[in-house]
Amino acid sequence: MALPFLPGNSPSRQLGKERFHKSQHWDTFDGVPMLVGSEKPGIGGEPLYGQKNKPTFSVYPRGQGSDLPAWLAFDKQALCFEAYFQEAVTESQTETHRIRKCKIYFYMEDDTIQVVEPEHKNSGIPQGTFIRRQRIPLPPPDDDQFYNIFHFNVNQQMVLHSRIFILTDCDSFTRNFLTKLGVHVNDSTTVPEDPYSNLREQIEKSMTPLRPYERHDTLKQFLDHDRKVLRFFCLWDDSKSTFGDPRELVLHYYLADDTIEIREVISRKPGRTTVPKFLRRCKLPKDGVARVKQPGQVTDRTVLNVLSSTSQGSRFILDSLKTGSVQEDFYKDCDLAVGAEVNVWGRRVLLTDCDSFTKEYYRSKYGIDFTPVHLQAPPAPKPPRMVPPYNGFGSEEDSLGFCLNLVPKPPQKDFRKLMEKDRCGFDGHVLSFRAKMVTSDPVDRDRTFLISFYLSDDSITVFERPISGGFGGKFLERGRVKKPGQEVFKAEKSEYFTAQDLYVGATLCINNRNFQLLDADEYTYNYMERHAEEFPKANVGNIISQLRSIPEEKQSEIWKFLTLSDPSNTGFIPYESFSTLLSGLDCSLSEHEVLVLGRHFSEPVQQSEVDVGLMLAIAQDFLRKKPFDDLPAMARAFTHQDKHKEGHLPSKEMRTICKAFQLPFPEKLLEDLLSRFSDGDNIDYNAFLAGINWFENPAPPIKPEDSLKFVLNMPPNEAEAPLKNVNYSSLLQDVFGAPPISADPTTAVS
């Protein structure tokens, strides 16, 4: 007795079910609701009433445990069948149909089919892939299903896209695979004969030549001389024709196939219609006939008619003696030479010169050395372009641009010099000199100036140092300065001051005011001595050569003066005495040359160091003028970089953080401060921040000239002489070859 269909009396189908999704069966096309999912399953993927599960693929491999997917089990495996189909030919009298052979490939991984027709030579029809790889549906009324592996067998018909294919055979792998699946594979069948293919075979057999053709082998010449071209420079004198003139040509001879090509050298303004080639690449005959022969007129063999009758047919034979052949002589490489003429279809072209490869080719093969032929006169020199004098408007370079070009361009600067001599790190490429004004005015006589020369663009700036009762500041804006004594309105370019014109002791006329250079900073001395080839006044070799020209009678006076200046016989004399000695000699040495010579033979002098309190006061003065209030942020940055919380950081990291916060210190002041707070390679950043903190630890006020020393990179004490003692014994040995005086340098007389 069956239980009633009531809750609790029958098992539920939903027990253990986890999927309850619903398929989309309806959709709207152009506003019309339509059923689009008739084959889709119901709720949770269960089939609806009347639906049957259709397998996606035809073959599923049997494996132990979980089955492998078809795309992995049958990867790179395909069944191959031989087939043909019959194609009707309606517009031909010789044939009514054609039999076209093809191969059908069935890929088991996804049940796709591909039809390929083998290509035949001169078939006249497109061949190759006939049906690209795809899943092909069955013919109606089963067009909702696709072909699978069980639809294939030998000696049966298949309809692929309304075209009937007949399978005739298969390969051994396909036969074994179908047999293992339980499919009985039929026997192979033959392909019917194609009348058109038989006709083509007969035509090809009838076209078989009864005699061998003569073959001229040119492959060796091509392989030996490919990409090798002889180049000759030619001249064609066409001056006899109307409006003609001599024309320059370039002849190319290709060694690979003995062909010649001629191109014309086209000038910038030819005055005629130009063509890319004067003669296309071809074999050039020597006779240069004006009339081209008709096709078939030039042949290697002559055909002789031996017998011609209506009953026995025609008989022909080839002339083995070649009595009727026409011989043509073409130009070879042996016919070309510098100075020879080439007949280019009636035009006489003279070979005047060749390139280096052509000369080497003829020298190695024929032992000939070519000499160029000069027929044309050298081009006349261009007349000099007259430049009008300067009119006073704008700069001279800018005014010259209006004379050289119709559309003026801005004056070009020396970019290479700018990149080489521009500021790079601590190397500023700026020569600084201390100068005074040469005048009879007692007020201007005491004024002190700082002249800076920028090597990147040869510009000069002049700053006046502040003195008591006067104002300092910029005296001359940065720019190039002309040398005095030049005419203003002239056609030639004006001369400007260069780096070689500035040295200690020189007098410069800047804006009708004379300045005498008194001293220079240490960077200027070092730069001029390192680049002695550019600065003759700093070249020690040139200075010693001038001293060697002193007469012998004055050498005894020099020895006597040195003996009196060095009573202890130490080998050192004061620099003042050394300078007085050279100034009294008639060797025309400037003050800068005396300084360079003294620096070269001097003992090192230790400069006095600046007080730490003064440097901190100068640093606070810079921070107060900024004003700079990022000291707490700098303290946090130093603490963050200090991983071990030791209160010390490397000098490189300290300098990087100071640059990141844009600390308004000159380079020299920052380097001196970091060196004072350093303990080896590490720096105490707490002491550094406490010293420059102008909020909590204000320093006493400073003088303006103290901060100017660090801004202009001047020595701490200008009154102190940069040189003290000079080793005159080494100087005499280098100049006169005298033996040095043995003495202890530590006991030198000050």
Image (tube, grey):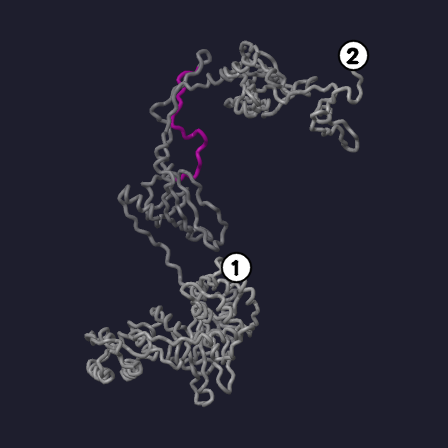
Is residue 633 left or right of 8 when viewed as pictured? left
Is residue 116 left or right of 725 when viewed as pictured? right
- Crowding at label 1, few (<14), some or many (≥20) Cα neighbours within 10 Å? few
Residue beneath the point at 48% across and 55% down:
269
Q: Secondary structure at mark 2?
A: loop
Disc 2 or 1, which lies upstream in sequence?
A: 2
Viewer can see residue 93: no
Residue beneath the point at 59% across and 12% down:
156
Q: Secondary structure at mark 1?
A: helix
Camera-nearest residue between 486 and 475: 475
Residue beneath the point at 57% across and 72% down:
627
**Of helix, strand and loop, which mostly describes the magenta segment?**
loop
The correct choice, above or below, for 216 with respect to 363 in the image is above
Viewer can see residue 682: yes
In percent of width and height, residue 145 lies at 66, 20
Q: Amino acid at mark 2?
A: Met
- Crowding at label 2, few (<14), some or many (≥20) Cα neighbours within 10 Å? few
| Label annotation for residue 207 | none
Residue 86 forms part of the magenta stretch = no
The C terminus: image quadrant: bottom left
Q: Amino acid at mark 1?
A: His
* Residue that carries the numbered disc 2 in the rendered image: 1
Residue 300 forms part of the magenta stretch = yes
In percent of width and height, residue 342 lies at 37, 44
Tell me the distance, in whole angstroms, between the alpha carbons under discs 2 and 1: 88 Å
Count numbered badges in the picture: 2
The residue stretch that appears in magenta: 287-308
Camera-nearest residue between 630 and 429: 630
Camera-nearest residue between 649 and 315: 649
Is residue 165 left or right of 30 when viewed as pictured? left
| Label annotation for residue 640 | 1
